[in-house]
Image (cartoon, rainbow, N blue to C red):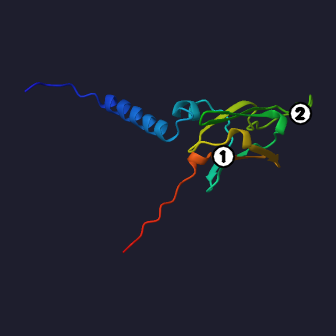
Amino acid sequence: MNIIPWKPFGELTTFRKEMDSLWDRFFPEIPFQERYLAHEWLPSIDLTETKDSLVVRAELPGLDAKDVDIILTDDILTIRGEKKEEKEEKDEHRFYVERYCGEFERRIKLPALVKIDKIDATFKKGILSINMPKSEEAKKKEIKIKVH
């Protein structure tokens, strides 16, 4: 029988790597460490699917449409932009500064192919809405089964 030294922290390191890997599988657009350790702001999004289209809604408070770029490459939708810092008054004393200023980029893997030439985006009251009609081959086909 061999004697093997016990390394309790080695097991914790392996567990941490496994948990990071799990997060990366569920949220592949941004690695776990980058998402939570960089302390950067990312807009909150909703991705919904109907029979004929995909709709992405992103919360972009304090931004104008000219501050945002939308890029679609294959099945990855990228929303990027910059939130500008408000000018500070000379006699102003700040107690808290928690609002994020700077560049951001959010990538979303789309669950279906879309018609690139039919994408429509609107920006109203800080909400960016992107309507993307699905391509014909991406629409789900329904098969009726006859029961005897």
Quadrant in the picture for the C terminus:
bottom left
- Closer to the camera in the image, 144 or 115: 144
Q: Earlier in the sequence, mark 1 or mark 2?
A: 1
Q: Residue at x 63, y 47 (%)?
A: 134
Element marked by disc 1:
strand
Q: Is residue 136 left or right of residue 58?
A: left
Q: Is residue 86 left or right of residue 19?
A: right
Q: For this view, does 109 lie left or right of residue 58? A: left
Q: Amino acid at mark 1?
A: Ile
Which quadrant would residue 70 be assigned to in this image? top right
Quadrant for the N terminus in the image: top left
**Residue positioned most to the left:** 1
- Residue 11, given in percent of the width and then of the height, sits at 32, 32
Residue at x-position 32% and y-position 28%: 10
Q: Is residue 56 left or right of residue 128?
A: left
The one nearer the camera, 37 or 127, is 127
Residue 35 place in picture, x, y as percent: 58, 34
Q: Quadrant of residue 79?
A: top right
Q: Where is residue 62? Give x, y as percent.
A: 82, 41
Question: Badge 1, how many Cα within 10 Å: few under 14, some, many 20+?
Answer: some
Percent x, y of residue 57: 70, 48
**Which residue is disc 1 drawn over?**
45
Label 1 – label 2 distance at C-alpha: 34 Å
Question: In the drawing, what numbered circle is on residue 92?
Answer: 2
Viewer-nearest of discs 1 and 2: 1
What residue appears at the point 45 percent right and 35 percent down from the top-left corner? Answer: 20
